[in-house]
Amino acid sequence: GAGVSQSPSNKVTEKGKDVELRCDPISGHTALYWYRQSLGQGLEFLIYFQGNSAPDKSGLPSDRFSAERTGGSVSTLTIQRTQQEDSAVYLCASSLSSRRFTDTQYFGPGTRLTVL
Amino acid sequence: KQEVTQIPAALSVPEGENLVLNCSFTDSAIYNLQWFRQDPGKGLTSLLLIQSSQREQTSGRLNASLDKSSGRSTLYIAASQPGDSATYLCAVRGHIRGSEKLVFGKGTKLTVNP
């Protein structure tokens, strides 16, 4: 079946512009996660959604970052007034449920963001 | 705050060799530990998931062990092949509400030479 998809695969933008990154989780998965992988850094958690519960935003690095999940499916990560330090690969993952601790997280291919 | 460390950062071996990748974590209160593989320009592929109550998991030539009390896990790869070349990531998941996220190590970059 279809896995997690992300778009665009690559995004180049100018400093100060806003960008939107999209994630389509696996159908039926209620949990959705966003992570960021910067050069030389490990993956760091940004935000996660579980069903209709309030999202866990504890990993968002600043108020320029926000995310929403419409209809419990597709999610959009928005970065406002981009800075060069925002350059990274943004990875999305989904799982059947975050409340079932046996559930594996399945990752998309990522969006490579470059801020000039 | 949970921290995950992977040693070595890079490893180069000849084809056919057996090898061990190491992962350590600072907070033993975890629900599970996962090993992932990441190929250049690609997302992550889950290899093995070990629940906190388990000691090891096996899949083909891969065997992962977990010693929760000492905060350590190893990934054993038998009879390595060039196709195993990739970055291997270890991640742990917390057990309290609000810690459903994965905390990752920085990975071990493996190169298997033909």
Image (cartoon, coloured by chain):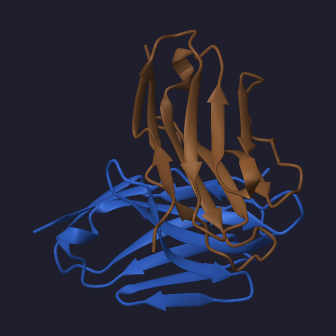
Image colour for chain B is: blue
**Going by the image, does B53 lie left or right of A22?**
right
Above or below, B14 against B42 in this view is below
Above or below, B46 against A93 in this view is below
Above or below, B55 against B84 in this view is below
Residue furthest left in the image: B114
- Residue B26 place in picture, x, y as percent: 73, 59
**Going by the image, does A24 lie left or right of B31?**
left
Q: Quadrant of residue B73?
A: bottom right
Q: Which residue is drawn at 74% across and 57% down?
A: A72
Q: Residue at x 62, y 62 (%)?
A: A94
Q: How many marks?
A: 0
- Residue B64 place in picture, x, y as percent: 51, 81
Front residue of B75/B84: it is: B84
Which quadrant is home to the C terminus of chain B? bottom left
**Going by the image, does A11 lie left or right of A97?**
left
- Residue A41 place in picture, x, y as percent: 52, 39
Q: Which residue is drawn at 44% across and 69% down?
A: B21
Q: Quadrant of residue B33?
A: bottom right
Image colour for chain A is: brown
- Residue B48 place in picture, x, y as percent: 52, 79
Front residue of B31/A54: it is: A54
Front residue of B61/B43: it is: B43
